[in-house]
Amino acid sequence: MGFKEEFKREMRNIQNDVAKEVEKYWVLDFEGHKIEIINEMMEEVLKVDGEIIAQNVRKSIWTHILPFSTLKGKFQSSSGKTHKVFVKIGGFVKLNVTVKVDGKELLHDAMKLQFLPWSNKEFIVPFIEQQFLANQKLITKDLPDDAFLYDEFYPKHAPGFADQLHTEEVTPFYTKKLIKLFLEQMNNPTDQTRKATYEKIKDEKVISYYYEFLEQFSEIEKVESRVKEEALWLLEHSAHREVVKFALIVLGTGNCEEVKERLKIIALHEEFTGVALFALTNGTTNSNETVWHVAKNVTGWGKLEALNFLDASNEDIRQWILLEGLKDTVPGNASALMCANKGKLDIELHESAISEKIYEGAGTIILGLLYEGSYQMMDDYEYAGQVMMRYTYHAKTHCRTLQQFYILTQIHDYLQYDEETWEDRFSTNWKPHEKRAVEENIEGIAKNPEYLKQAFEILGNGEGDEDYALAVAQYYNADITDIVLLKLKSNPENYKYYMALFSAENVQIIEQLLEITNSLWDFNDLNEDQKMVVLVLLEELEQYDGVGLQFLLKTLKTTDYHLQYITIQTLQNYNKSYWQGTEIEQLVQRYSKESKDKDVKEIAKQLME
């Protein structure tokens, strides 16, 4: 998010806070008549017996610079007498209200406007606890501060994901200043000292100073009871998630046994799983059963955190990790590696015979290790060669379904890396005989024609998992061109169909695929699936010098900087003679001078050199 968008969001939040603070309501009785005064950010209203008799509507929040506003109106009593009502509202530091009827003062009130950051908002921990008490589970992952954090410039993440993304450190001396403020709060707990600490916490990611805080806080002399009291106050009064996380970390620096059940409930929300489990494992006794309970009841990033804290020395827990540890986690992260290590997958597969359940669990973990994100966890796994050899050995007994054979195709793909990669692997976690054994085991199992037959049946009738069928067909180098092209006619947004056809390395097929997308879609209005198709086509075109120039022109003309960037990267692999003197060159020339995206501008300059 840029500075402009960040500023707009901050101003929006400030405006909302002010609006809630000044929102007041008074009701009075005058000779049986109900008089209501409503004060809001953009208007003041005077009602008598439910009817509006005076109203001030503001066009801008800046009109609040006037210190006072008045409301005047008349109403008749049942006797027919006319009464005059006068209301005066305003003030900078205090909100003063005076109400008079026929010159007689009925109300004079003055209340201080404090603008405390937690006031007029729903507290997060009570929100979570109420859900759990009512349902024995959390029924929503939404949090009361979602509106504070997310907008059109900052889309909502899965719970816990923002902490995984965060890499920025806090400014120098931030942590030292925060600790000083919290000590002042502990020694003199008032609205003002709590406000100072709260505001320091709420706008910084706790993850960015987590370790620094624990180190510095441990060296300070403090009264543990006061630490706990103020940490609990923050926990119970927090309307911002970073304050909740800070409170949980502080609780974890001491004994928090009496709030163990509360921590367990908070840990069930994936946004807080990691910090709540820190408090549980650091501040309570016999916490591992509780951690296991949490691990079994969270998903996504929360489950990754729970696996990290879980001690697998208990045999039941170790078996659970092997069989269930990867269910409902996020693919492509460290959870597969943790499950392999904590579940002692290498030892389990070393047995001469294993159960069907263990075979299934092992396959799930191996797929997780093979997941192609920024890198494959399998290359970090100490026992990679041994486990792959033993798994494929057991596959000779247990591999029966297309899904199970699909895992073997993924292992086969992993084996196809270049010599340099294998030199690195042989020096770390593989031995040459293990690789040969894996290859031979897979080749032996693949002799069964049933797998390819099943793949063609699924691709033909559309009943079953097509991802498995496509991978198996590709493993056998089967010609599925006609089948997949036919499928594309009814489902042109499935990028996996395109990738299945890339393996043919046929320029005529590539041109057909480009024509499909060119004719169907407006490249300035692509949905997510369509954009993925366009991106995989752009990446594939790097291998076909001079092919698809009309397609490249169309992606270059979009207003999507990401597509422009990938297109220009693709052009770097083309001989300039193919696009010089064309509209493509004109656009590249223009982007090299005028593009608002610095990356597009830089590569465009390089292309024009």
Image (cartoon, rainbow, N blue to C red):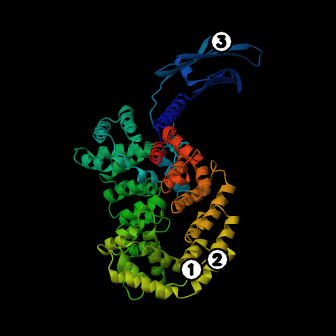
- Residue 155 spot, x, y in % from top left: 53, 47
Residue beneath the point at 43% across and 53% down:
272
The numbered mark, 1 or 3, whose residue comes first in the sequence reads: 3
Indicate which disc residue 322 carries: none
Residue 244: percent from left, percent from top: 41, 47
Image side of residue 407 versus residue 276, left or right: right
Secondary structure beneath dot 3 equals loop
What is the three-letter code of the residue carrying label 3? Asp
Which comes sooner in the sequence, label 3 or label 2?
3
Residue 77 to residue 333: above or below: above
Query: Which residue lies under the disc numbered 2?
Result: 458
Q: Nearer the viewer, residue 20 or 467?
A: 467
Q: Check the image and report above or below for 113 versus 298.
A: above
* Residue 158 in view here: no
**Which residue sits furthest top?**
103
Q: Residue at x 58, y 48 (%)?
A: 582
Residue that badge 1 annotates: 402
Q: Nearer the viewer, residue 453 or 68?
A: 453
Dot 2, how many residues are within 10 Å of its Cα: few (below 14), some (14-19), or many (20+)? some
Dot label at residue 102: 3
Are discs 1 and 2 less than 8 Å apart at CB? yes
Of the numbered discs 1 and 2, the one sitting upstream in the chain is: 1
Amino acid at dot 1: Leu
Mark 1 → mark 3, Cα distance in angstroms = 88 Å
Q: Residues within 10 Å of mark 3 (few under 14, many from 20)?
A: few
